[in-house]
Image (cartoon, grey):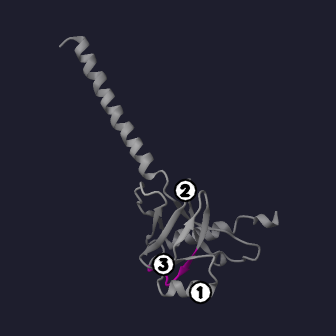
């Protein structure tokens, strides 16, 4: 083979590889870019004295430039449920008790805190707890892969202890 032919094969091979990389980035951008983001957080207020009094919350943020509908939350194993904070406590607890899903609508760039209500304690402090968030977008073209948050009771207790070391904003 001549040098020019070998060089041509190298150039076309590199071009094909870059084409596959470009297609992968495009697919990621189109299918996964506008998914909601979720995490576990704790926040202390002025009257909190003990780490156990710091309520854990599931925080959800809409990163999309359009409305998202969060349809339901699935917690496996079912040690706790997720309750919207905007319900009165009695009504919210009855929804959790009967296993009723409460859909929420998130505006663009909106962030919402959801209360975590424990039904029973996990068998182990380090047992993995998976929260799956099922959602749907306003536009029909998106692939709505569920968002998953993985945690454990030990992780939640660590976050509660860490929240005790933060000075509340209202006291600054």
Category of crowding for the residue at label 1, using alpha-carbon neighbours closer than 10 angstroms: few (below 14), some (14–19), many (at least 20) = few
Where does residue 58 sit, x and y in percent of width and height?
56, 69
Q: Is residue 84 magenta?
A: no
**Residue 72's disc number:** none
Q: Quadrant of the N terminus?
A: top left
Report helix, strand or loop for mark 2.
Answer: loop
Q: Is residue 111 above or below residue 95?
A: above
Above or below: residue 9 compared with residue 138: above
Q: For the magenta stretch, what is the residue range?
A: 115-123
Residue shown at the point (62%, 71%) measured from the top left: 160
Q: Secondary structure at mark 1?
A: helix
Mark 3 closeness class: few <14, some 14–19, many ≥20 residues within 10 Å: some
Image position of 81 (left or right of 88): left
Query: What secondary structure is found at the residue carrying circle 3?
Result: loop
Residue drawn at the location 64% of the way across and 83% of the way down: 88
Does residue 121 show up magenta in the picture? yes
Residue in view at x 72 percent, y 77 percent: 49
Residue at mark 1? 91
**Disc 3 designates what residue?**
101
* Image coords of residue 118 (percent x, y): 53, 81
In the drawing, does residue 20 fall left or right of residue 141?
A: left
Dot label at residue 66: 2
Mark 3 or mark 2, which has the lower sequence index? 2
Which label's residue is closer to the chain start, 1 or 3? 1
Q: Could you say which quadrant of the image residue 89 lies in? A: bottom right
Q: Are marks 2 and 1 in contact (CB under 8 Å)?
A: no
């Amino acid at each position: 083979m001549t040098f020019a032919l070998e060089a041509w094969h190298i150039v076309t091979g590199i071009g094909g590889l870059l084409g596959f990389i470009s297609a992968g980035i495009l697919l990621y951008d189109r299918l996964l870019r506008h998914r909601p983001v979720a995490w576990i957080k704790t926040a202390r207020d002025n009257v909190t004295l003990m780490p156990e009094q710091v309520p854990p919350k599931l925080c959800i943020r809409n990163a999309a430039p359009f409305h998202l509908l969060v349809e339901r939350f699935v917690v496996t194993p079912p040690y706790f449920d997720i309750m919207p904070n905007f319900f009165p406590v009695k009504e919210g607890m009855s929804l959790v008790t009967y296993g009723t899903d409460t859909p929420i609508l998130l505006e663009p760039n909106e962030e919402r805190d959801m209360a975590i209500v424990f039904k029973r304690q996990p068998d182990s402090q380090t047992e993995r707890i998976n929260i799956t968030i099922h959602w749907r977008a306003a536009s029909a073209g998106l692939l709505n892969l569920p968002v998953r948050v993985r945690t454990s009771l030990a992780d939640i207790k660590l976050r509660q202890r860490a929240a005790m070391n933060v000075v509340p904003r209202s006291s600054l």
